Image: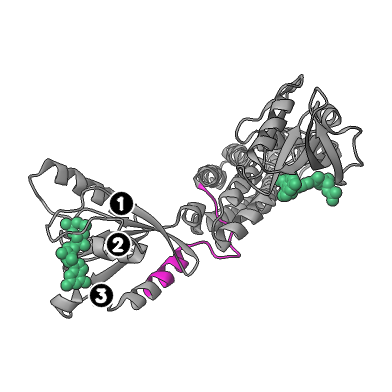
């Protein structure tokens, strides 16, 4: 029998209130043992909670959610207790002593929600992002995905592909008999339409950028003032600054927020050819960071700047170097010059790289599945009808992986069966 799981679902004690959730077939029995007869479903009740010996543990609000229409798809109970360490510990001990109950693993409530079909894989990912969301943009996007925005789009594509499959397979099977419309134009138009939609979604900024921040890399020769600028933007002395060229060796990261936009600020070793083996490793790491940058703040000779679509040429230390030709912006951290303009410029660049509010954005896992679906659809547009059918099948299987919901093949059987018999 499925075990019944419990966990503190609210923040760690001490807190004003602690919410303990219990999910599984024994949830109702556990609630009765602690609090007496079950209250009406979904209605809060104030009860004394007692342990197995009848000792009072706390006076608490309790809730009873009978399955399957619950957050986990199972019977679910909640105890809203006083959030003190000992109160929570006593309740966890009382629950742990009951038959068939055990503490939940991390994510296990959500895992059960997925297993029971309450949410699909994309929605579960959205839920995870929602719990991690720190900015308004992150919250809005995660809430949309958790609410099924991506799942609904994917399901619409699956429906369309299914129709195209049914049509093309009918042509393959019965085309010779002349009792189906042998025109392939319609299924091809459907495949093209879905491919265009997927391509649009893939072209949108990736969800990771919203979650982890836009990667802004400070790069340039040694002693250019990178770490000084990094510290100024980060608002703390995160990186060591000296007048010795080659001070920074490691890649140093600082998550910051500019105008509510998440940024991962990255300081790097000064780029130069040297013999010091430690510095050479640092330079190699700097080059890796550059390769993964969304935006590069280049603090060196503008003519020697790397080729990068998100390049901003900074004339650093402009209080001593004066104006430098070819830079986008002159900045002096020491004189406090150009810093506001730099922040504004960064905000503009960062905004353009983040998913817009109305956009759906996909993560790496979803992206891989979409790319595979697109490959299938491109195969589908080849002239051969057999390959067409196979490409559509590959696309369906790939899209299935986004929601983690199988059963499309069964649906095809059903639809295809009807299609043929009806003809
Ligand atoms: N105390 C508490 N707060 C919480 C949650 C929770 O589980 N417990 N949630 C946990 O994630 C979120 C709310 N999510 C929920 C989703 C569905 C149902 C639910 O019982 N749905 C039923 C009944 C709907 C109704 O009565 O209108 C359903 O959809 O059929 C409850 C909470 C956020 N706040
Ligand atoms: N006058 C002036 N000096 C600056 C300014 N910014 C940095 N410096 C000085 O320049 C020197 C090098 O600064 P860093 O920030 O360590 O330079 P870096 O590019 O990180 O150097 P490496 O880590 O060696 O690659 C230090 O002595 C700083 O005080 C500035 O705006 N004006
Ligand atoms: Mg440095």
Would you say residue 300 is visible in this rendering?
no
Q: Are the two marked residues, 1 and 2, in contact with CB atoms closer than 8 angstroms?
A: yes
Identify residue for label 3. 331
Left or right placement of residue 421 versus residue 113 in this view: right
Earlier in the chain: of badge 3 and badge 1, it is: 1
Identify residue for label 2. 230
Residues shaded magenta: 345-363
Give the numbered dot on residue 252.
1
Give me the residue at 79% from left, 33% from top.
Answer: 74
**Across the whole image, how many numbered discs are drawn on residues?**
3
Earlier in the chain: of badge 1 and badge 2, it is: 2
Query: Would you say the beta carbon of the disc 1 residue lies within 8 angstroms of ligand 3?
Result: no
Q: Are the two marked residues, 3 and 2, in contact with CB atoms closer than 8 angstroms?
A: no
Residue 34 is covered by the magenta coloring: no
> In this picture, is 214 found above or below 176?
below
Q: Residue 129: horizontal and vertical position, in percent?
A: 57, 49
Q: Residue 185: horizontal and vertical position, in percent?
A: 65, 53
Left or right placement of residue 272 versus residue 383 in this view: left
Residue 242 placement: quadrant: bottom left
Left or right placement of residue 63 versus residue 296 in this view: right
Left or right placement of residue 389 versus residue 335 in this view: right
Q: Residue 319: horizontal and vertical position, in percent?
A: 18, 78
Give me the residue at 33% from left, 63% from top.
Answer: 309
Query: Would you say the beta carbon of the disc 2 residue lies within 8 angstroms of ligand 2?
Result: yes
> In this picture, is 190 found above or below 28?
below
Residue 358 is covered by the magenta coloring: yes
Q: Residue 55: horizontal and vertical position, in percent?
A: 80, 28
Query: Would you say the beta carbon of the disc 3 residue lies within 8 angstroms of ligand 2?
Result: yes
Give the farthest residue toward the left: 275
Distance CA(mark 1)–CA(mark 2) = 9 Å
As rendered, which of 85 and 315 lies closer to the eye? 85
Q: Residues within 10 Å of mark 3 (few under 14, many from 20)?
A: many
């Amino acid at each position: 029998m499925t075990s019944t799981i419990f966990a503190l679902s609210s923040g760690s004690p001490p807190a004003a209130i602690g919410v303990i959730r219990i999910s599984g077939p024994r949830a109702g029995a556990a609630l009765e043992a602690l609090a007496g007869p079950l209250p009406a479903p979904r209605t809060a009740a104030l009860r004394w909670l007692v342990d197995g010996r009848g000792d009072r543990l706390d006076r608490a609000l309790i809730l009873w959610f009978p399955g399957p229409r619950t957050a986990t798809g199972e019977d679910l109970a909640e105890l809203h207790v006083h959030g003190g360490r000992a109160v929570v510990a006593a309740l966890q001990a009382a629950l742990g002593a009951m038959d068939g109950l055990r503490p939940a693993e991390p994510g296990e409530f959500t895992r059960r929600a997925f297993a029971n079909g309450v949410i699909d894989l994309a929605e579960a990912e959205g839920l995870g992002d929602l719990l991690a969301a720190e900015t308004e943009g992150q919250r809005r996007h995660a809430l949309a995905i958790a609410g099924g925005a991506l799942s609904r789009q994917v399901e619409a594509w699956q429906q369309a592909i299914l129709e195209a499959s049914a049509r093309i397979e009918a042509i393959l099977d019965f085309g010779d008999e002349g009792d189906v419309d042998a025109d392939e134009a319609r299924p091809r138009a459907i495949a093209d339409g879905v491919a265009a939609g997927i391509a649009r979604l893939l072209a949108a900024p990736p969800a990771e950028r919203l979650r982890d921040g836009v990667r802004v890399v400070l790069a340039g020769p040694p002693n250019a003032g990178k770490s000084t600028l990094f510290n100024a933007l980060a608002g703390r002395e995160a990186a060591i600054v000296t007048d010795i060229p080659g001070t920074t060796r490691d890649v140093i990261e600082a998550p910051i927020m500019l105008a509510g936009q998440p940024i991962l600020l990255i300081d790097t070793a000064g780029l130069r050819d040297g013999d010091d083996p430690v510095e050479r490793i640092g330079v190699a790491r700097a080059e890796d960071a550059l390769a993964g940058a969304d935006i590069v703040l280049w603090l060196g000779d503008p003519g020697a700047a790397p080729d990068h679509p998100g390049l901003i040429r900074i004339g650093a230390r402009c209080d001593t170097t004066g104006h430098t030709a070819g830079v986008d912006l002159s900045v002096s951290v020491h004189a406090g010059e150009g810093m506001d303009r730099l922040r504004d410029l960064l905000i503009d660049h960062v905004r353009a790289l983040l998913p817009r509010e109305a956009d759906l954005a996909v993560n790496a896992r979803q992206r891989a599945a979409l790319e595979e679906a697109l490959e299938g659809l491109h195969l589908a547009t080849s002239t051969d009808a057999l390959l067409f059918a196979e490409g559509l099948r590959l696309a369906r299987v790939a899209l299935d992986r986004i929601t983690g919901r199988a059963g499309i093949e069964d649906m095809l059987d059903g639809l295809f069966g009807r299609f043929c018999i009806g003809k």
